[in-house]
Image (cartoon, rainbow, N blue to C red):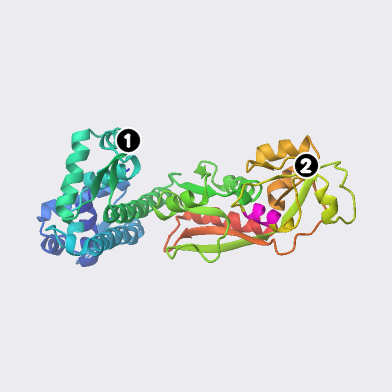
């Protein structure tokens, strides 16, 4: 949500003074009084906790904190501007009135209402989530429609949904918010406050060994940094990444990237393995055949998973369930329990069972699976600028991946 975010007019005033070096010229450009500009700068400096300008011989000069914040604020305002253009493009001839450059008129309250509605889909739930009253949320939402001249909300049997134009504006607003928070965090870090945070979306192939190792290494330098790990379906995680809720996504790459506003970076390649419990009748054999594997029951991921696709192709001409009921499961915890207490087999990434193999619980069987290589890596937003804390985590992640 947008609570605690500086007034948008204060941010515009900051950019104008930074560009012109003059409170007087900035006031003329954005049609505010000089005292209003000075007050805006003072409140913004209070919010970030340090001066952003110092008085030079003939002009206002950015401090180191101001220099750090400026590109973030510029990107923040540019993202809002892009969002307004997209709203106009989507609405086309259906636009009724509104203001051409309504991004200059947006308020934190309106963006807060838009974000809350995007999450809740209901005015009362949105009010509860944002800490505002329902009339306040409703009023801000309608003011936003008046500014844009475009229908942003429509009633459905499930509540209230955002129109396509509103969804696009909400996405740009969230990305803008993420950019601004990055800038405020950078300044806090420069002031010696360990305010950094990282929100990581993790897919199964990364969360067993690579990600824990990177977090442990990172924690040796930044023990107080807050790290949030989010798990879930790829599509939902990708949505969170693209909307600024998640900083980076780690797991199997889709190659090519599923959409143009994200970038994929390879960390390492992974190969699928046939796995069984330690002491399994097939363990210790030098070679195995498909006939050998077919004699044992299997537990495998549900349809749609890459491992399930490989399993189905492997047994295309055979009935892999004849040795026992086929169990479909995607939980690594459940899979481990089924394997260690039975003679079932599975196909899984070697990286996902590193600890189980080290502990002598599971073993990799000598049955190669050619063509099962998958590249594991990072997915980030195109144009994402990590903070120093986030950069350090990325360095740890790359180092751990090289060692693996």
Q: Secondary structure at mark 1?
A: helix
Residue occupying image coordinates x 61% and y 61%: 267
| Closer-to-camera residue (107/16) | 107
Name the spot of residue 94 as percent of width and height, x first.
18, 60
Name the spot of residue 179 as percent of width and height, x first.
36, 55
**Which is more N-terminal, label 2 or label 1?**
1
Q: Which mark is residue 248?
A: none
Q: CA distance from mark 1 to mark 2?
A: 46 Å
Q: Which mark is residue 129?
A: 1
Based on the displayed image, in which of its 4 quarters is residue 290 positioned? bottom right
> How many numbered markers are drawn?
2
Name the spot of residue 89 as percent of width and height, x first.
24, 65
Q: Which residues are magenta?
A: 306-312
Answer with left or right where residue 225 lies relative to residue 68: right
Q: Is residue 77 magenta?
A: no
Based on the displayed image, in which of its 4 quarters is residue 159 positioned? top left
| Closer-to-camera residue (387/258) | 258
Position of the C terminus, as image quadrant, is bottom right
Name the spot of residue 271 as percent of width and height, x first.
71, 58
Query: Does any portion of residue 389 appear in the rendered image?
Result: no
| Closer-to-camera residue (76/106) | 106
| Closer-to-camera residue (260/304) | 304
What type of secondary structure mainly makes up the magenta span? helix
The residue pinned by badge 2 equals: 344
């Amino acid at each position: 949500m947008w609570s605690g975010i500086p007034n948008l007019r204060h941010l515009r005033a900051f950019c104008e003074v930074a560009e012109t070096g003059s409170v007087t010229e900035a006031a003329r450009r954005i049609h505010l009084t000089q005292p209003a500009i000075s007050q805006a700068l003072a409140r913004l400096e209070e919010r970030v906790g340090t001066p952003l300008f110092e008085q030079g011989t003939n002009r206002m000069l950015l401090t180191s904190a101001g220099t750090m914040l400026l590109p973030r604020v510029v990107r923040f305002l540019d993202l809002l501007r892009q969002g307004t253009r997209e709203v106009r493009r989507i609405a086309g001839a259906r636009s009724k009135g509104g203001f051409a450059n309504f991004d200059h008129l947006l308020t934190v309250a309106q963006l807060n209402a838009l974000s809350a509605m995007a999450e809740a889909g209901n005015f009362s739930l949105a009010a509860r989530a944002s800490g505002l009253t329902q009339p306040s949320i409703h009023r801000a939402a309608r003011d936003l429609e008046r500014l844009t001249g475009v229908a942003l909300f429509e009633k459905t049997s499930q509540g209230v949904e955002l129109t396509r134009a509103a969804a696009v504006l909400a996405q740009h607003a969230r990305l803008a918010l993420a950019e601004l928070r990055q800038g405020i965090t950078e300044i806090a870090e420069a002031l010696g406050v360990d305010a950094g945070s990282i929100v990581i979306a993790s897919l199964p192939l990364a969360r067993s060994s690579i990600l824990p190792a990177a977090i442990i290494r990172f924690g040796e330098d930044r023990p107080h940094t807050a790290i949030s790990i989010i798990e879930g379906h790829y599509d939902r995680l990708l949505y969170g990444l693209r909307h600024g809720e998640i900083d980076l996504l780690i797991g199997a790459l889709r190659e090519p990237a599923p959409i143009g506003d994200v970038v994929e970076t390879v960390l390492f390649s992974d190969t699928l393995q046939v796995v069984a419990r330690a002491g399994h009748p097939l363990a210790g054999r030098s070679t195995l055949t498909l006939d050998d594997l077919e004699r044992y029951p299997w537990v495998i991921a549900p349809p749609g998973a890459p491992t399930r696709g490989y399993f189905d192709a492997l047994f295309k001409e055979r009935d892999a369930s004849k040795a026992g009921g086929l169990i479909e499961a995607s939980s690594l915890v459940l899979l481990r329990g089924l394997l260690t207490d039975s003679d079932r087999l599975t196909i899984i990434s070697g990286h996902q069972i590193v600890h189980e193999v080290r502990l002598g619980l599971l073993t990799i069987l000598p049955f190669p699976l050619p063509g099962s290589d998958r590249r594991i890596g990072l997915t980030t937003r195109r144009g994402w600028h990590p903070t120093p804390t986030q950069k350090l985590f990325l360095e740890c992640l790359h180092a751990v991946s090289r060692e693996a």
